[in-house]
Amino acid sequence: MLFLSSIMRFLHTDNIKHINMELKWLEDYLALVDAQNFTLAAAVRNVSQPAFSRRIQALEAWLGIELVDRSKKPMQFTAIAKEHETALRLLVNAAYQTRAQIKSSRLDHLKLTVAAQHSLLVSSFLPRFLDKLSVRVPNINYNVVSENMDTCVSMFLRGAADVLVIYESDFITSEISRNISSKKVLGNDEMILVGHPKLVGAMQPIDLNRPIPLLTYPETSFFGRTIRVNALPSMVRRYHTFVSCESSFAVGLREMALAARGAAWLPRSIIEADIARGVLIPLNDICAPIPLRMVAHISKVSTNVACKQLVDIL
């Protein structure tokens, strides 16, 4: 009880200079616990041994208890000191964490909620876009939510996201009104039909009667609609195909393609390295690439200060 009441007195000390000094004393003591030797601990704390010993004594006087049993050689810690070593470590850590949180809150950081399509989160476009925003608006932090396109658009329209980052194509767009959104094209991408070399080798020469296993997306998803509008009709007329796997996640289909489970339509931005290494091969002779655009919608109706700044800039 005596030890705990001393700790409580530490927490309720009003004099900031005293708190700073007493925190250093606690750090001195923990250095001594770790070193198990006054000389080594003094060297770690970058003070002379006599000065270090005086600081340990000052801490003991302030706490009102003995921490070190000096009657024994080599030195030993008292039972109460051993019992509360963990509490002291937690106390020092909590003090610095609290200070860091207070300092952080004073920096007046702005925060944006960004809803981004799954595939864009694993490409380089979204990080580059966020880096550009950071340059335009200093002290900005992000809360990035990764979902499918329809969910992201819904979040944006109901005000749950300040910025929307998604794919669009010539045939499929989000159709978000310009009255509520400032739209910016971030760059171009394309959906490419690719296959593992093992799969491609088995398909050569191309036999119109040999079935081609496809890794594709639900027809209600953006990528699913894009493929059904731009690729599947002509492909089905020319080749014998069947769906080997269907998933909403391009990253998952990429893993299936790398395992030679079928041919998959994937954004070039997430498979460029795979193509360069030759572990995925474009099947452009079977299906031409489908152009895509990466766009950002920044809310014009959000009350977020950072959002208003971005609308004015863009």
Image (cartoon, helix red, strand yellow):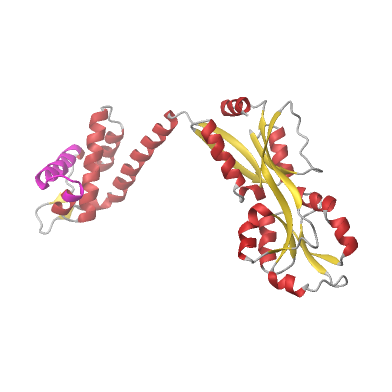
Q: Which of these two is toward me, 100 or 291?
A: 291
Q: Where is residue 293 in the image (x, y as percent from the top left)?
A: 71, 43
Q: Where is residue 150 in the image (x, y as percent from the top left)?
A: 74, 43
Q: Which of these two is toward me, 215 or 108?
A: 215
Q: What is the magenta segment's predominant secondary structure?
A: helix
Is the N terminus in the top left, top right, bottom left or bottom right quadrant? top left
Residue at the location (67% across, 60% down)? Answer: 254
Residue at the location (73% across, 56% down)? Answer: 192
> Is 54 a magenta residue?
yes
> Is 95 a magenta residue?
no
Whether residue 24 is visible to the viewer of this picture, yes or no, is yes
Q: Give the range drawn in magenta.
A: 43-62
Residue 45 lies left or right of residue 201; in this view the side is left
Q: Position of residue 23 (x, y in %)?
A: 26, 39
Tell me which corner region of the image, top left, top right, bottom left or bottom right, holds residue 271. Answer: bottom right
Q: Where is residue 51 in the image (x, y as percent from the top left)?
A: 12, 42
Is the C terminus in the top left, top right, bottom left or bottom right quadrant? top right
